Image: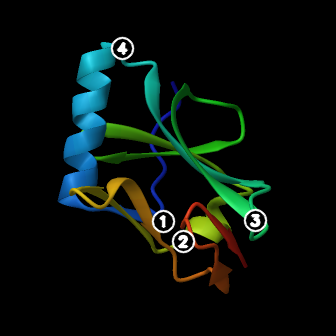
């Protein structure tokens, strides 16, 4: 695995999000080759959909670490995620990861896609 990027971490993970990611990584028994992949892809009702998954490092990734969580973001997608806050809610009315993205000019009703 490459060394960590010296740049500012482009996203913010809340304590709830970090706790959930660490719990999922532990339950799945991921080794050190795996990390959290954050990104965007074309699609969804507003133009872009978020990517949040466990993956291995790819050639074009910037590598960061947040409280022991390896974080992989494709360099070409980083601009869409800069200052995006990722939270995790587990209430009765809402359970899952929530993206609060200041770069989004509009979002869909379900919150999983956006336009920039």
Q: Residue at x 71, y 41 (%)?
A: 60
Mark 3–mark 1 distance (CA, rounded to whole Å): 25 Å
Secondary structure under the numbered disc 2 in the rendered image: loop
Question: How far apart are the alpha carbons under marks 4 and 2?
Answer: 27 Å
CB atoms at circles 1 and 2 under 8 Å apart? yes
Q: Quadrant of the C terminus?
A: bottom right
Residue 45, disc: 3
| Res. 82 mark | 2
Helix, strand or loop status at disc 1:
loop
Q: Secondary structure at mark 3?
A: loop
> Residue 57 appears at what percent x and percent y?
58, 29
Is 30 situated left or right of 91 in this image? right
Residue assigned mark 1:
10
Considering only order in the chain, which callout, 2 or 4, is on the residue closer to the N terminus? 4
Residue drawn 29% across and 61% down?
93
Left or right relative to 77: residue 10 = left
Q: Can you give x and y, in whole percent of width and height, for residue 91 in the image?
A: 21, 57
Dot 1 or dot 2, earlier in sequence: 1
Q: How many marks?
A: 4
Q: Which residue in the rendered view is the most extreme toward the bottom?
A: 105
Circle 2 packing at 10 Å, graded few (<14), some (14-19), many (20+), is: some
Judge the density around disc 1: few (<14), some (14-19), many (≥20) Cα neighbours within 10 Å: some
Circle 3 Cα neighbour tier, 10 Å, few/some/many (<14 / 14–19 / ≥20): some
Q: What x and y, as percent, mark residue 107?
A: 62, 77
Read off the residue under disc 4.
31
If you read the primary sequence from the N terminus, does the residue marked by circle 4 or circle 3 appear first?
4
């Amino acid at each position: 695995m490459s060394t960590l990027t010296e740049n500012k971490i482009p996203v913010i993970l809340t304590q709830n999000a970090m706790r959930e990611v660490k719990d999922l990584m532990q339950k799945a028994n991921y080794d050190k080759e795996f990390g959290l992949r954050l990104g965007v892809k074309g699609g969804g009702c507003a133009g872009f959909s978020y990517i949040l998954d466990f993956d291995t490092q790819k050639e074009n990734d910037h590598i960061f670490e947040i409280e022991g969580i390896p974080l992989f973001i494709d360099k070409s997608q980083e601009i869409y995620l800069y200052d995006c806050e990722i939270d995790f809610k587990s209430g009765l009315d809402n359970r899952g990861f929530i993206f609060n993205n200041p770069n989004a000019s509009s979002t869909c009703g379900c919150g999983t896609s956006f336009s920039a």
